[in-house]
Image: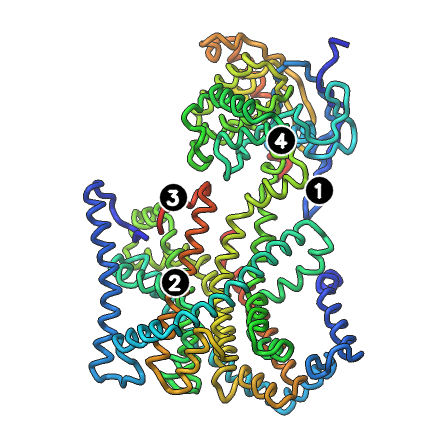
Amino acid sequence: MAAIDQAPAPPALRILRSTLWAGARLVSIALLLTAWELVARSGIVTPFQLPALSAVLERIWNDAASGDLAINTSVTLYRAMVGFFIAAVGGVVLGMAMSRSAAARWFFDPIISVGFPMPKIAFLPVVILWLGVFDISKITMIVFDAIFPVVAATVIAIQGVERELIWSARNMGAGQRELLWQIVLPAALPTIMTGLQVALPLSLIVAVVTEMLMGGYGLGGAMMTASRFANSTGVFAGIVEIAVVGYALVKAMALIRRRLLIWHQESQNFPSP
Amino acid sequence: MASAAQIIIDRVNHLYRPPRGREVLALDQVSLEVANREFVALLGPSGCGKSTLLYLIGGFLPVETGAILIDGEKVAGPGPDRGIVFQHFALFPWKTVRGNILYGLERQGMPKEEREKRAMDFIELVGLHGFEDSYPSQLSGGMKQRTAIARTLAFGPDILLMDEPFGALDAQTRALMQSELLRIWQRTPKTVIFVTHDVQEAVYLADRVAVMSARPGRIKTIVDTKFDKNDPDILKAKAFVEKVDEIWHLVREEAIKAQGKRA
Amino acid sequence: MKQSLLRYLPLLLLAAIWELVARLELVSSTALPPLSDVIAAWIDMIKDGELTSNGASSLYRAGAGLALSVIVGTALGIGMAWWKPVNVLLAPMVEIFYPLPKSALIPVTVIWLGFGDGSKILLIFLGCMLPVTVGAFNGARSSEQVLVWSARSMGANRLRMLWDVVLPSAMPELLNGIRTALALSFILLVSSELIVAQKGFGYLIGFLGANGTYDAMYAVVFTVAFLGFAADRVYQMFVQRMLLWRQ
């Protein structure tokens, strides 16, 4: 994260400098939070428009104490993760099938290329019509949204495997099965992971929207209830809770990527972005 | 039939079919015989089909017209009797140096203890001791190519196919790797077919140099280039320099022709 | 022509199966009205202006929000790559808000700006800004040092370099970020209109669904889906033009 156009400095100075910059980053977050509290208390805005940070934290604390926070978080996470895993496995399998069979490619290629850029969320009322308002239709919506980036990434990844790599493996006696599991999939993994890293936040976005629309337990549902009762502290508490869950999921995924791709160039160049 | 050649390439044609555009005759009636334990270089301008010929011998591309025989048998696909080394190494980036070398031995079903020992022997042979647990992305270009050579030698092919193996290396590393390859070749003699567009490299390494013409690829001449490879001053010897010069002129003509045709 | 027909044959096949399944009443006609009914409903809605008027207000919201996010996002991203203090101030905030599921902002924008156009535009602006910022930042950061140096040696000052070197080399990643933002803008538009609105595509879908006029609802759903797809295609053609120098 270095800015362009800066002169190299001696090592000791560089370490000192980077520690200072890292400290400055923390200050920036602290500034944001302080500004929130000050603006909320100053009277420029009403507490309805922006409740004080302290009030929001208190609300979160109460949610946690009553157990609501744990229930809502786990319900939302459950839906998002089940949907994500189905999309991940289904997407990789479908992508592999499209790479290997001309018939599968002929049938699914137009569906994927037309379906990927579509706003699938518009189909939500149709899915409700078919499957009701419970978990099954929420998870269906998540899979429907998250599977496209996974399929597209898998197809591109497998196409991008160098023929020399495959030839080398065949040269050493690898058969079709071994080529797929030992060569093609590992070589395609970095790009497939990138697809999964797009699909994961998408799963969470859709989980929250479906909960907002269909109600019931879950972080999105709780936020919507608070909104209906004009309880803006509850709404802001919801944002903070959802932000924390989103942040944790994205960081966890990045960690998994680094672990799985320890051999990949990027993990050597950037130990911790 | 002791005198019969190990590799016989008999009037091979090859059509290159690009995804778009017209097909190109990449190889035109190419014939060549290579004896057991002989080191032959295929030399020519880029686009003369020398790599294609190598891939045909390796069995990676199908032979459509003509025939390629190895020890009297038609090539029908890749096999562990012919090992290939590519210009861009083609190492498995998710495996360590040791893992890359072990892969071929595993596929052959060699017992664990034996293959571990064999892998270490070849790591030793190419001078990569201490780097066996490094991933390819942590190695320099020269070390990557050493790994690729060790990986191919380890599964014990009779024939070594090398596709511009030093083309991606800097000049110093390239010179080092050339003498290294000769040292290894003298210790474990094999038949080698070596594709290059570097004239001096071809003359220095090979027993014979097949000069190829471009578009369509044909073998223009075959030049004898047997020199005493152990002579440290061979690169400056008069006979050597003259040989390089002679072949250089042959290749230059072809390169100019190829340029002209492209324009 | 014939080739593209063959390419999209699977889609036509699906459409034919839809019509057949619905006509033979293999599923209830409320759950799946025949395709021909849906098309008829679509034509009716175009005629009486219901679809076009709601569509216009949706596209206005998406367009305004997206345009704002592109302008502000590009400025922020390049600023972060070019001036270290800006980076230090903003990078931590970008890092925290980037993974936020943007749909969580829907109730907040309603609290701030009510149920009308303003809240949707603000939502789309906030939701789409970060992908553009990150794209611009990554692109500008990767502009090669040699280019910057050679521009400087040719006498370009800092501002000129920003315009002549940094912005063009940031372009591929920036345009990619805008593509993500484009897709997000449709998702946020439809979600927010489904949840709270008095006009727009999402409102129309919800209204028709509640009324039980499912053929019309399907017609609107597919119109939105098609617009999202078409916008992406048009954008990609535009990008190809912009990046001709890369070939």
- Are the numbered discs 2 and 1 placed on the same chain, yes or no? no
What's the distance in space between the residues labelled 3 and 1, CA to CA? Answer: 39 Å
- Are the numbered discs 3 and 2 placed on the same chain, yes or no? yes
Residue of label 3: A269
Residue at left offset 74%, top offset 74%: C18
Circles 4 and 2 in contact, beta carbons < 8 Å: no
As drawn, the residue found furthest toward the bottom would be C48
- Camera-side residue of A165 and C139: A165
Q: Classify residue A59 as left or right of residue A83.
A: left
Q: Secondary structure at mark 3?
A: helix
Residue of label 2: A247
**How many other residues sit within 10 Å of disc 2, few (<14), some (14-19) or many (≥20)?**
some
Amino acid on which the number 3 mark rests in the picture: Asn
**How many other residues sit within 10 Å of disc 4, few (<14), some (14-19) or many (≥20)?**
some
Circles 3 and 4 in contact, beta carbons < 8 Å: no
What's the distance in space between the residues labelled 4 and 1, CA to CA? Answer: 33 Å
Chain letter, disc 2 residue: A
- Are the numbered discs 4 and 2 placed on the same chain, yes or no? no
Amino acid on which the number 4 mark rests in the picture: Arg
Residue of label 1: B17
Amino acid on which the number 1 mark rests in the picture: Arg
**Of marks 3 and 1, the one in the foreground:** 3
Q: Secondary structure at mark 2?
A: helix
Residue at left offset 67%, top offset 19%: B221
- Are the numbered discs 3 and 4 placed on the same chain, yes or no? no
Q: Which label's residue is closer to the chain start, 3 or 2?
A: 2
- Residue B107 is tagged as 4
Chain letter, disc 3 residue: A
Q: Position of residue C205 (x, y in %)?
A: 58, 83
Q: Position of residue C125 (x, y in %)?
A: 41, 74
Any part of residue B115 in sight: yes
- Camera-side residue of A147 and B218: A147
